[in-house]
Amino acid sequence: MDLFRTNNGISTDKEFEELLSGLSIERANIYLCSSLLSLGRPLNLKVPELLINKILERVGKEGTLSIPSYTFSAYNKQIFDPVSSKCIVGTLGETARKMPGFIRTFHPVYSHSVKGKNTELLNSQSPKTCFGKGSFFDIFCKIERSFIIVLGGSLSALAFYHYYDQLFSAPGRFVKKFKALVRKGEDVTEIEFDSYVKDYENFYIGDLMNCLGRFDALATELGLLQHIPFAGNYLHIIKEEDFRKLYDACLLIDQKYFLCSTKKEWEEYYPKNNFKMFHGKIDPEMRKEVQKILQSN
């Protein structure tokens, strides 16, 4: 089946199958984030479902696929209904939540559509925290053979790294309480939950932004992050354990260098999707300091 039309021609399902066959994701626990429009013009309404099914086939019955189905309902003063609240962070998340066999986890902001061996475990995420103990991310990271995949976007598209921010008490953020209305069956109740939010008064001042551009470049130089061409863009894949350890090291060495940028740099890396912008430009001394930490762990 033809999937996408790009400047270089047509991308097919066979090409996607070949790409997946080169990844060691059998029996893996996958977190998938995507930006399908960056891959090209979809040529069939079934493209999102086909991509999802191809990944499910690759991980097999012993694997699990999780796709963000975020609503941000709580922040928009809306009732979160796991059955009807639309995903607003991507076509794959909206598609997956309607597909047979997928279970949508219960959270007023960070719900996920999950299918596979670890569905029940991941569905036990607490609705009372976004990134703390018992959150989806906390549970996901404790499962063996876990990988993070970004299809067509960049690492800055991930909400996942905010879990590491809270886990490692990253400067520039603090725990804040929120309230949300949620529906379970016929009942609507109010719950309280926390998130790890930006401190704009003391840290993120001026045009300082969260940006994983240099982290991307560093992970690539260290051989931890793969970039595989597909359609009009790339598939990026990294082991969750490698992501976590490298993120921790970057926080210890220089958070603002590795994990932040100016607004102009952020716009180039994230909205304009130029993931290569810092590749080959990492300060060698900074890289050595990070490597020392990684080697000591």
Image (cartoon, rainbow, N blue to C red):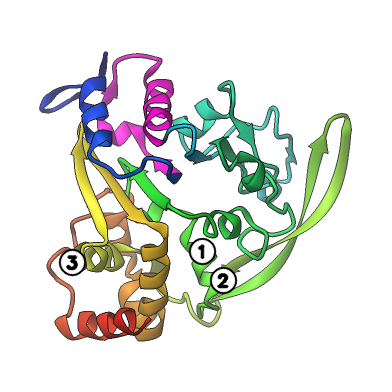
| Labelled disc at residue 58 | none
Marks 3 and 2: in contact by CB < 8 Å?
Answer: no
**Mark positioned earlier in the residue sequence (2 or 3):** 2
Identify the element where label 1 is drawn.
helix
Q: Which residue is mark 1?
A: 162
The quadrant in which the N terminus is found is top left
**Crowd rating for badge 1 (residues with CA inside 10 Å; few <14, some 14–19, many 20+):** some
Q: Which residue is mark 3?
A: 221
Marks 2 and 1: in contact by CB < 8 Å?
Answer: yes
Q: Which residue is mark 2?
A: 166
Kind of residue at disc 3: Glu
Spatial CA distance of label 2 from label 3 is: 26 Å
Of badges 2 and 3, nearer the viewer stands 3
Of badges 1 and 3, nearer the viewer stands 3
Q: Which residue occupies 27% across, 56% down? A: 269
Say if 296 sits above or below 179 in the image.
below
Spatial CA distance of label 1 from label 3 is: 23 Å
Kind of residue at disc 2: Gln
- Residue 255, given in percent of the width and then of the height, sits at 38, 79
**Mark positioned earlier in the residue sequence (1 or 3):** 1
Marks 3 and 1: in contact by CB < 8 Å?
Answer: no
Q: Which residue occupies 67% across, 59% down? A: 134
Q: Is residue 91 magenta?
A: no
Say if 121 sits above or below 213 in the image.
above
**Crowd rating for badge 3 (residues with CA inside 10 Å; few <14, some 14–19, many 20+):** some
Kind of residue at disc 1: His
Q: Is residue 207 visible?
A: no
Q: Which residues are magenta?
A: 31-59
